[in-house]
Image (spheres, rainbow, N blue to C red):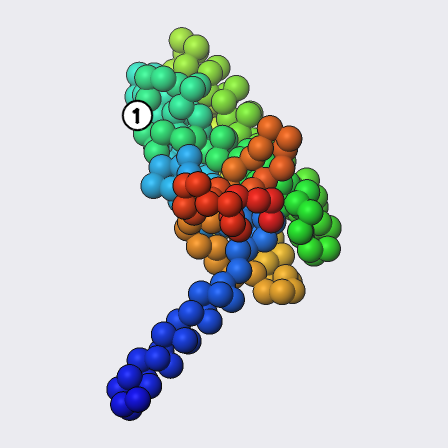
Amino acid sequence: MSRGRKLLSLLLTVIALIGCTTKAPTIAHTHIGHAITGWIETPGQTGLLITAEQEGATVAANTRQAAAAANLDATRRAVTEALHALDPSSAPGGTAGLGFGLLPAVRETLSHMAFAAESDDASANVRTSVPEINKKATSIVSRCNELEVLGRAALASRSAKEAKLLAREMDKLAAGIVDDGTGVTYGLAHLRTDIEAMIDREDPRYTTVDTWYLLNLVRLPSGKWIFQQRDPGSTSGYGFPQ
């Protein structure tokens, strides 16, 4: 056999061995990936926490505008846009944001973190860390709900002064939610820090989950999570619970 053919044969053998040793990620790590890397239902299929951060920035930008608005109409317009970025269903007339909403994104982030902790293959680290993280992060959900209540009150108000006061309270809440992590209020930056710290403690080490796995994890009627089959009709590997 020529040297070139030997090298080619060796290369093909290495490729085959790599393919044989590739393992699917754990279900727990895939759910964590849904939070921080990608999810099929978000705009651009970005991670749920990423979506929350983007929508949160839009909410905060609009509450700042509402708090500084010169008149009642301007306040109402900015509040409407803030509410739309918070949760599109609460302000159908708005256009700001990605169309997903800060509140739904945070809720889904916490849901997938809980799914990770409940997975049969979750590590002790994930099982013990997630409940504490989610407990702290429920304060973000509560403040989002409060934002919506204040926003609806501002839109219903006929007083420019009252609407502006309400908008200023909204702005304070929004600022706490998108805090850069240096403040005392638990916000999105704190949530990201806690998730990343948990990931750093994982053993075996967490690695970024491939897009295919992120977008092809499905839940059976029984509640069991599985990866869809890569090839239609295939009965090997991915179509069975991991």
Q: Position of residue 62 (x, y in %)?
A: 36, 31
Can residue 170 be seen?
A: yes
121 lies above or below 13 = above
Q: Residue at x 66, y 45 (%)?
A: 119
66 lies above or below 124 = above
Can residue 167 be seen?
A: no
Element class at badge 1:
loop
Q: Position of residue 28 (x, y in %)?
A: 60, 49
Q: Is residue 189 left or right of residue 70?
A: right
Q: Position of residue 206 (x, y in %)?
A: 56, 61
Q: Nearer the viewer, residue 36 or 212?
A: 212
175 lies above or below 4 = above
The residue to which callout 1 is attached is 95
Picture quadrant of residue 67: top left
Q: Nearer the viewer, residue 24 or 3?
A: 3
Q: Position of residue 226 (x, y in %)?
A: 56, 42
Q: Amino acid at mark 1?
A: Thr
Number of disc labels: 1
Q: Residue at x 63, y 33 (%)?
A: 223
Q: Nearer the viewer, residue 10 or 214?
A: 10
Q: Is residue 94 left or right of residue 178?
A: left
Q: Residue furthest front?
A: 1
Q: Residue at x 38, y 81 (%)?
A: 10
